[in-house]
Image (cartoon, rainbow, N blue to C red):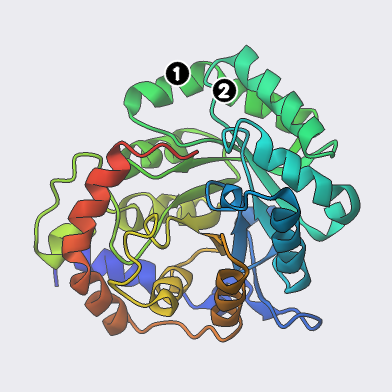
Amino acid sequence: MSLSRRRFLETAAVSPMALGAAVDAKTGMPTRILGKTGARVSTVAFGCGSRFLMYKEEDKALEALNKALDLGITYVDTAFSYGNGRSEERVGKIMKTRRKEVWLATKVQERSYDGAMKIIEGSLKRLQTDQVDLLHIHALGDADDLKKAEEGALKALYKARDTKMARFIGVTCHSDPVVLKTALERHDFDCTQMALNAARVGMRNGKAGMEINDLMKDSFELIALPVARKKKMGVTAMKIFGQEGLVGKASVEKLIRYSLTLPVATAVLGMPKLEFLEENVRVAKAFQPLSKKEMQVLAGDLKLAKLEMDRFFADHVDA
């Protein structure tokens, strides 16, 4: 067995029980522990990015978020760059009355210290709270981007954590697992959010080979996820559907199950329609992990899609 394949199987083999899996007695929603934060969160999270902004009427957007909370979703993921604050403003209208029910995460795309602090202060106002649970550096790019973040935004995040503006800090990435690995190894992050889907999204250059072992070598799953696990970080999966690029190539249920079989606490899902929300919650509540064999087969079936995904996410703007 090759080293890459063996490492893949080791990564995929973590039982949900090892992540503190439990079921909320009131809603029936499965929950897991978010790494060293010790927080218990729902296994699906409500993504408030571009799909949330597809609700053109604000009352419909607020209805969807309220329904998500009623169904047992406790993790809400937003960012200033989602509509230049519009997503945060919408979320804030719900947080005004339901803040205690929610694990609230937002993100900072500015790389300078002053720029990041300005965004953070504005986010708290828009979200109508004096503290977020998790504050991420948003969409880490290449090595140069990491250097800029280290020189400015990262210091702002440490300041925010020290002054209780944020309980915990993290970093997100969808374009380069090697750069994310470096960031996780170097710095004191509590959490991380990365692209973890059955197409094995990975390197920016999109030059992955066509063999399944080659596909494994350049994915977040193999490169960055083990570092997060070793450091006991809370891990959140994103890009489960590859911005819809994987929908139709595999069932929604299989795509969600793949990501939730990995050692993650939750998967952030965009839900631009109430029927999508209901279906995603149904899958989460009926979740059964895929076997190692099922994961290998699904990844193999999507190897052509991986090449498309790698190229797409190399230039994708998470907004």
Query: On the image, numbered disc 2 is attached to which residue?
Result: 153
Residue shown at the point (42%, 62%) measured from the top left:
240
Q: In the image, what residue type sits under mark 1?
A: Lys
Quadrant of residue 258 within the rendered picture? bottom left
For mark 1, give the secondary structure: helix
Whether pointer 1 and pointer 2 mark residues with C-beta atoms closer than 8 Å, the reply is yes
For mark 2, give the secondary structure: helix
Residue 77 appears in the figure? yes
Farthest residue in the right direction?
97
Q: Position of residue 80 (x, y in %)?
A: 63, 33
Q: In the image, what residue type sits under mark 2?
A: Ala
Residue 165 appears in the figure? no
Residue sitting nearer the eye, 261 or 175? 175
What is the quadrant of the N terminus in the image?
bottom left
Circle on res. 14: none
Circle on res. 148: 1
Farthest residue in the front direction?
57
- For residue 29, side relative to residue 142 (left or right): right
Residue sitting nearer the eye, 8 or 113? 113
- For residue 280, side relative to residue 203 (left or right): right
